[in-house]
Image (spheres, rainbow, N blue to C red):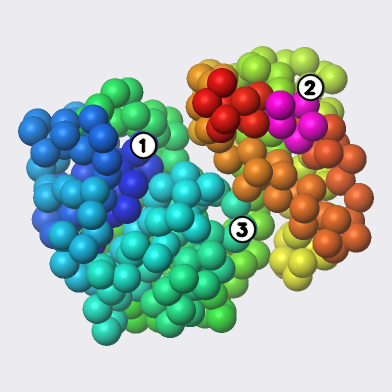
Amino acid sequence: MRIAVVGAGGVGGLFGALLSRAGEEVAFVARGAHLEAIRRDGLRVESPLGSFTARAPASDDPAALGTADAVLVAVKTWQVKEVAPRLRPLLGPATVVVPMENGVEAADELAAALGPGPVAGGLCHVLAWLEGPGAVRHTGFGPRVTLGEMAGGGSDRLERLAVALRRAGMEAAVVPDIRTALWEKFLFIDPLSSVGAVARAPVGEMLAAPETRALLVAAMREVEALGRARGARLAPDAVERTLERVEGLPPEATASMQRDVLAGKPSELHEQTGAVVRLGRAAGVPVPVHQALYGALLPQERRVRAGR
């Protein structure tokens, strides 16, 4: 398959490099020093799946890369609206566009810019990040990708993409209810990100403090209630299952939003913590824990985005 990876950071860089190593025709959309490093030296990967360098075409202009069979959108969640209209040159008559962002709104934002036809739903579970220009590190469990058509069910186009992902060494599944799967992922990542950013501690330290552990569970309960109000078919023990997954993470693990907050970078605060507050208000679901977490983190986010 010809696969365009938009955003060559930890997730996009790892996925694109693995796909390239497996023989797929990969092209990256990247920018700045990271783009120059990929062009000059390739993309270096350190991973339990192997240490290697992937070499693939890369540009900051999607129009320079031609059309693709599949487009994996792996930019930060807050960049989706900005980048979506620029993806049109990548689309052929049968192209599928799949977001890999955290949150529950990326597919709808892509569909608003590109039309609903090309866009499917997607999510991933992976611990990966940029160590510097042209360098990606992956740790912990192997990458897991979930795909599904936004209207429900699977499709041949998603099955072909899943086969390519599996050939590259990833777990990949096509599910009948991607919207519920997105809320299951959001139930995991948003509380971990939001509480972790305020606690300024890795998962092991958060779980070891009873008060912080209770805060994490309370945040999960709010996301669970909101997801159900918006039609997600979450399991009765969804919070308990999610907490078990968090407990299975490496003690030093942190979420990407948390890392951005701690590094003083723009983060996904508005698209995770803030989204719960906004969607909760619209659905009439009380989310006082998220309101407090959002209020605590908002001044820094505003300061960072203002360049101060």
The magenta stretch spans which residues? 294-299
Which is nearer the eye, 305 or 187? 305
- Residue 141 position by quadrant: top left
Secondary element at tag 3: loop
Estimate how packed mark 2 is, as few (under 14), some (14 to 19) or many (20 or more) residues with alpha carbons within 10 Å: some
Secondary-structure class at tag 2: helix
Task: Report how far apart the C-alphas of labels 3 and 2 lie in the structure.
Answer: 25 Å
Residue type beneath disc 2: Thr
Q: Position of residue 156 (x, y in %)?
A: 34, 81
Q: Height in image: 6 above or below 215?
A: below
The residue that mark 1 highlights is: 10
176 vs 255: above or below:
below
Of the image marks 3 and 2, the number of the one nearer the N terminus: 3
Q: Which residue is mark 2?
A: 212
Query: What amino acid type should be assigned to the residue bearing mark 3?
Result: Val
- Could you tell me how far apart the alpha carbons at marks 3 and 1 are, in whole angstroms? 20 Å
Residue occupying image coordinates x 65% and y 43% = 270
Mark nearest the camera among 3 and 2 is 3
Q: Which residue is mark 3?
A: 104
| Relative image position of residue 290 (x, y in whole percent) | 80, 39
